[in-house]
Image (spheres, grey):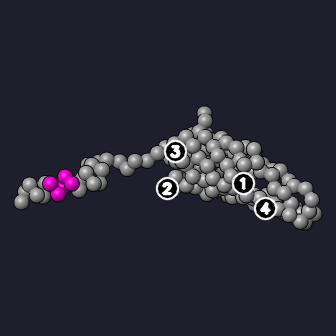
Amino acid sequence: MRRMVIGLVTLLLLALGGVGAASASVSYAGSWQGVTGQDKVIKFHVSARNKIDTATVTMKVPFQNCSGSTTFTSSADFDPPAAITSAKFRLRLGSNPRVSVTGHFRSATRAAGSMTGTFSDPVTGCQGTKTTSWTAHQGT
């Protein structure tokens, strides 16, 4: 009976990853930089606690009801920092223009996702929305 209990406990510990084993977590900490599908820049920083604390994106949004487009850069310092959950995150930068970014860390050094920018000019009434992809890598 004692051997069976020891065997079951051993089997359970092996299934759970061993005694005192920490769950495997990947650190994404550091500065990240990449390009969008529009050949514009995306940058963000991940803190030592695996949370995004700053981000900067540049995007071109064509007007849907007027001729032309607008290119803008949005930056944000997140307080509290944006959480990374299951290697995924969502960011919102600005209000007008506004950029919503979704991302997924493919590894400790590569990330990708999409972002949607919206802009509305209160003076001219021109407005637009554009979605594009992005990729980034961890740099210095």
Tell me the distance, in whole angstroms, between the alpha carbons under discs 1 and 2.
23 Å
Tell me the distance, in whole angstroms, between the alpha carbons under discs 2 and 4.
28 Å
Q: Toward the viewer: 131 or 80?
A: 131
Instruction: Tell me whether the residue at label 3 lies in contact with that at label 4, contact meaning CB atoms closer than 8 angstroms.
Output: no
Determine which residue is flagged by label 1: 132
Tell me the distance, in whole angstroms, between the alpha carbons under discs 3 and 4.
30 Å
Going by the numbered disc 3, the residue's amino acid type is Ser
Going by the numbered disc 4, the residue's amino acid type is Thr
Tell me the distance, in whole angstroms, between the alpha carbons under discs 3 and 2.
12 Å
Q: Which residues are magenta?
A: 7-11
Determine which residue is flagged by label 3: 107
Q: As displayed, is residue 48 above or below residue 10?
A: above
Percent coordinates x, y for residue 89 in the rendering: 58, 55
Determine which residue is flagged by label 2: 86
Instruction: Tell me whether the residue at label 1 lies in contact with that at label 2, contact meaning CB atoms closer than 8 angstroms.
Output: no
Tell me the distance, in whole angstroms, between the alpha carbons under discs 3 and 1.
21 Å
At numbered mark 4, what does the secondary structure look like: helix, strand or loop? strand
Q: Is residue 13 visible?
A: yes
Dot 1 alpha-carbon crowd within 10 angstroms: few under 14, some 14 to 19, many 20 or more: some
Q: In terms of image quadrants, where is residue 6? A: bottom left
- Pointer 3 or 4: first along the chain: 3
Percent coordinates x, y for residue 54 in the rendering: 65, 47
